[in-house]
Amino acid sequence: MVHVVLFSSLTSCNMASDPKQAKLDGDCRLGISEDPVLDRFLCWCKKAGIKLSSKVFMTKHGTVSDYGMLAKEDIEEGEEIFSIPRTALLSQETTAIHALLEKEKDSLKSQSGWVPLLLALMFEYNKTDSYWNPYLSMWPDFIVIDQPMFWTKEEREALLRGTGITEAVEKDLQNIEKEYNDIILPFIQTHSDLFDPEKHMLELYKSLVAFVMAYSFQEPIDDDDDDDDNDDDSTDKESTLPMMVPVADILNHVANHNANLEYEVDCLKMISIRKIHRGEEVFNTYGDLANWQLLHMYGFAEPYPSNRNDTVDVLMTTIYKAALQAANSDTERSILRDKWDLLCHLDIASNDGAFVFGCSGSLTEEELYTTLKVLCMSEEHFKEFKENKGWEEAEDSDEEVMAMSLSNEGIPKLSFPFKQLLWNTIVLSVQLYSSDIKEDMQLIQNMGKNVKLSRREQWALYVRYGQKVILSNLLQMTQPH
Ligand SMILES: C[S@@+](CC[C@H](N)C(=O)[O-])C[C@H]1O[C@@H](n2cnc3c(N)ncnc32)[C@H](O)[C@@H]1O
């Protein structure tokens, strides 16, 4: 059962554009705070129809990071903590320039799919009388998050080499610049009555991208709806539009979260998924994210070992490299090249893909199992495999068997050639980092004692160490006797 505890209805709200003025209009607020910017936002929330349980409050004090939400009374499992009507969501459909964005939609298509929302944010942010002003004013200039894209290249190399983040950031930076020059700049120059090209610079755009990366939401696609549509592929949605969800985006994340966002027809609701005690922070989940993904997109990582979703990516090309290194002749190397090309052709492996390992084994077991099997198979078997373009109905293509074989229980029981290849692959992967596991372990153990680290160094350490622990366990499991 859902218990709803709402603020009693208060007097009408004067949306003062001066934050200090809002303090005087305390009656209209959806809660009380000592922060005039937050007060003004709370006032806006009430007017926008957002309902907040009287058992919680928003604050910058006592949270894991800046704004967050704390419980001032115990909250039972299944209680509604707040609800947001869909009209209070900021997206390309609710911005004042939605008609223009719709008209120009073909020229605004981009790889990220974020361009219309980013333009909406740019427009609303600079419009002093924007309906969304009290919301967006919470993050002046959007300079809030310290994602690695804002670190120097040298820092990224020194702290994050081997983690997968440096490559992801390089791609992001290239895409941001390309989208800005190819799509955003021509658009704002054409619409100079709405946008000031002097104000809308690449640097602001980069901060906005970072903001959308860390604060926007994407409604999950309902698989049941797809099933109901059964055969009609034309109705299949690839993804939903990104949007800003005021109040929900105040919540911080931990893997062991205590609340979940539910998407209903008219509104979005944050519901507690277990008892939250008075004084505890209300935590949402941003997804089952590994520490490297949290640092890349949100600029933080969970302290080791609290992130149960932690994973490490092993580059697919590393397994190929390991197989080539173990080959004894040009003929063997040439067969391996054929095998690799076929795996890529069949979309089982790729030159920029990765095998993912979590705390209990492989999370990409189908790809890994097939790759191990093909790379280790005899020339005759490979000929057959090639002629069939894969296995039609091989006994061990069964998903459960593969998952079992590549779990932490299964890996030590793999055949010798599989284990040997996996071991060689992990040895090469470990070498990609700029520090070894012992150094990182000592840093973790001495943090707060004789070791003082900056925030960036700390986050990077949690990412590296978590990954190295998974790799080191894999080394033990695959150790050739
Ligand atoms: C959706 S916002 C949450 C609200 C944010 N704390 C604020 O003050 O605006 C996401 C950002 O909050 C911070 N954050 C969220 N969870 C965190 C955590 N467990 N530890 C440290 N920072 C966190 C990160 O900076 C992240 O990019």
Image: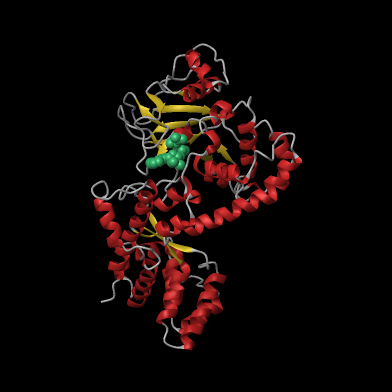
Q: Quadrant of residue 160?
A: bottom left
Report the colour scheme.
Answer: secondary structure
Q: Quadrant of residue 260?
A: top left
The answer to whether one can see residue 358 in this image is yes
**Residue 27 image point, x, y percent:** 48, 13
Count the marks: how many? 0
Which corner quadrant holds the C terminus?
bottom left
- Judge whether 424 appears above or below 441 on screen: below
Q: Residue at x 32, y 67 (%)?
A: 411
**In the image: residue 62, left or right of residue 179:** left
**Residue 422 image point, x, y percent:** 37, 71
**In the image: residue 193, left or right of residue 410:** right
**Residue 177 image point, x, y percent:** 62, 52
- Judge whether 308 appears above or below 265 on screen: below
Which corner quadrant holds the N terminus?
top left
**Residue 440 image point, x, y percent:** 30, 58
Q: Residue at x 43, y 34 (%)?
A: 251
Quarter of the rendered structure image containing ligand 1: top left
Name the one closer to the observer, 186 or 474. 186
- Judge whether 306 appears above or below 435 on screen: above
- Judge whether 242 appears above or below 343 on screen: above
Q: Residue furthest top?
A: 11
The answer to whether one can see residue 261 in this image is no
Q: Quadrant of residue 404?
A: bottom left
